[in-house]
Image (spheres, grey):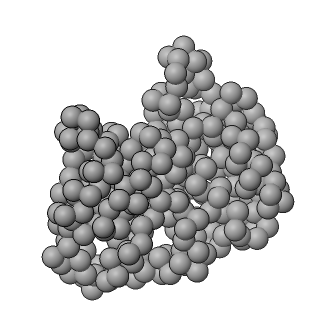
């Protein structure tokens, strides 16, 4: 039995295999429509989520399986004080696989250590979000046709953005990748990721506060929202929330084949006027994410 807590638990070859499976599902959905017949997915979401939870549920239904679970800690026994370990042991009696989102870093790992079925980390605090990373990777591959030889800009909240942390770690295993890290000083990428991933692997990176200066170099632009829920101070959040807003003017000197990504939800960091630009890939990212979750569920269940 195997779980997925951190994207680095998947080898490069396994990611290639998941992308190939996802492409197979896109090409012939009917062929996969009964692959998880009789199987149950439990979605344990201790933190609000629309996209990730519905994506997991849609993935399981489209594989012919069933879904049980809850969408808020208030709707679970956690509100009575039950531990994550006990929840995992209990839910293992009802389901064949668990997807868990939790505000505390490490909670899905605790669940995986106590569950008797596979656990998928659907986001833990500001730490990891491996299935979003799988959605991001397939989007880059579908749009650019490769992972090597790319310049990738991350813009916005690089401090608390778990999607950014996971994707940088995943991309660090490919060749000739350059990262441009665009953020206010207060939201720069954490030192441990710079030290343990970028510098340890001798990867090229630049830190800047200017999106406009970075734009002409970029093959991929990954926008993020400044997340109110990660701030201790409302005043600090309000000061930083509109640091970067991508609009059509800022794209005037961008590459014609730029791939614009965003893990969503967006607030106002990408103007709706950008949605009609053929370079906007964030809604494709959502769709690709469902197919990658289908591929992952099949892999972990061994079907």
Work out whether residue 75 or residue 90 is closer to the camera in this orientation and state it. Answer: 90
The residue lying at 49 percent from left, 53 percent from top is 129
Residue 300 vertical placement versus 242 (above, below):
below
Give the side of residue 49 with respect to residue 191, left or right.
Answer: left
Quadrant of the rendering where the C terminus is positioned: bottom left
Q: Along the horizontal axis of the image, is 218 left or right of 143?
A: right
| x and y, in percent, of residue 193 in the image | 70, 48
In the rendering, at what x and y percent does residue 251 appear? 66, 44
The quadrant in which the N terminus is found is bottom left
**Most distant residue in the bottom direction:** 31
Q: Position of residue 31 (x, y in %)?
A: 27, 85
| Image: 177 above or below 123 | below
Q: Is residue 42 above or below residue 143?
A: above
Is residue 114 rendered to the left or right of residue 219? left
Pick the residue in front: 149 or 161: 161
**Residue 238 in which image quadrant:** top right
- Residue appearing at x 54%, y 71% in the figure: 10
Instruction: Examine the image and state in which quarter residue 115 appears.
Output: bottom left
Q: How many marks?
A: 0
Visible residue check, residue 52 = no
Tell me which residue sits at (23%, 77%) in the image: 36
In the depicted structure, whether residue 120 falls above or below residue 102: below
């Amino acid at each position: 039995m195997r779980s997925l807590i951190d994207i680095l638990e998947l080898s490069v070859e396994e990611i290639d295999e998941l992308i190939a499976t996802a492409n197979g599902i896109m090409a012939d959905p009917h062929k996969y429509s009964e692959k998880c017949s009789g199987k149950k997915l439990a979605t344990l979401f201790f933190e609000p989520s629309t996209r990730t939870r519905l994506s997991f549920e849609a993935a399981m239904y489209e594989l012919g399986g069933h879904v049980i679970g809850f969408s808020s800690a208030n709707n679970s026994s956690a509100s009575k004080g039950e531990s994550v370990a006990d929840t995992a042991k209990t839910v293992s009696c009802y389901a064949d696989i668990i997807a868990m989102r939790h505000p505390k870093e490490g909670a899905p790992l605790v669940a995986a250590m106590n569950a008797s079925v596979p656990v998928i980390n659907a986001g833990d605090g500001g730490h990891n979000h491996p299935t979003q990373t799988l959605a991001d990777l397939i989007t880059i591959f579908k749009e650019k046709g490769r992972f090597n030889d790319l310049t990738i800009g991350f813009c916005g909240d690089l401090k608390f953005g778990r999607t950014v942390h996971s994707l940088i770690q995943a991309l660090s295993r490919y060749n000739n990748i350059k990262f441009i890290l665009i953020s206010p000083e207060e939201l720069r990428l954490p030192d441990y990721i710079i030290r343990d991933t970028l510098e340890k692997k001798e990867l090229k990176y630049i830190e800047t506060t200017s999106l406009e200066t970075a734009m002409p170099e970029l093959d991929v632009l990954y926008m993020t929202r400044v997340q109110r829920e990660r701030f201790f101070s409302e005043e600090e959040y309000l000061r930083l929330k509109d640091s970067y807003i991508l609009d059509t003017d800022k794209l005037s000197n961008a590459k014609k084949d730029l791939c614009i990504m965003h893990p969503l939800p967006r607030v106002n960091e990408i103007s709706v006027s950008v949605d009609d630009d053929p370079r906007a890939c964030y809604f494709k990212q959502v769709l690709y994410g469902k197919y990658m979750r289908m591929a992952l569920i099949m892999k972990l269940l061994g079907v």
